[in-house]
Amino acid sequence: MAEVCSHTRTEEFRLPGGLPFTLDVKQAAKLLGIGQNSAYEAVKRGEIPTLKIGRRLVVPTATLLARLGCSAADLGVTTEAEQ
């Protein structure tokens, strides 16, 4: 069977700064410095953005960072215009 995509490993797909495109709720909790239970409660309240894919809840990293007021510059990423 022919390979459909040469990039099959999820760790190869990253945002600028090396962050993954999505986090699970446990990873988001760690990033935010809160407990896992608090993170799931924040998800229920709509305070942490999530997407449901099948039975999985994932947190879009870029959306979460935007809600925190972070930009690419905060992550140490420079654009071509800044170089």
Image: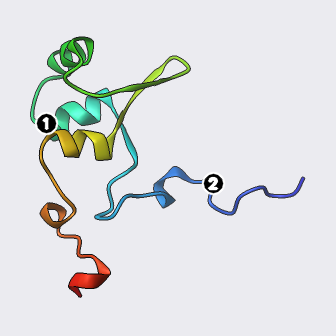
What's the residue at 27%, 29% (across, down)? 26
Task: Give the label on residue 49, or none.
Answer: none
Q: Mark 1 points at which residue?
A: 32
Left or right: residue 48 versus residue 5 is left
Q: Where is residue 81 in the image (x, y as percent from the top left)?
A: 27, 83
Query: Label 2 amino acid?
Result: Thr
- Extreme residue toward the bottom, this view: 83
Left or right: residue 50 versus residue 42 is right
What's the residue at 29%, 41% (across, down)? 63
Task: Give the label on residue 8, or none.
Answer: 2
Above or below residue 70? Residue 53 is above
Q: Position of residue 1 (x, y in %)?
A: 90, 53
Q: Position of residue 21 (x, y in %)?
A: 40, 48
Which of the 4 quarters of the picture holds residue 82? bottom left
Q: How many labels does the image show?
A: 2
- Spatial CA span between label 1 and label 2: 29 Å
What's the residue at 21%, 45% (across, down)? 65
What's the residue at 18%, 18% (across, down)? 42
- For disc 2, the neighbor class at 10 Å (few under 14, some 14 to 19, many from 20) is few
Query: Label 1 amino acid?
Result: Leu
- Identify the image quadrant of the C terminus: bottom left
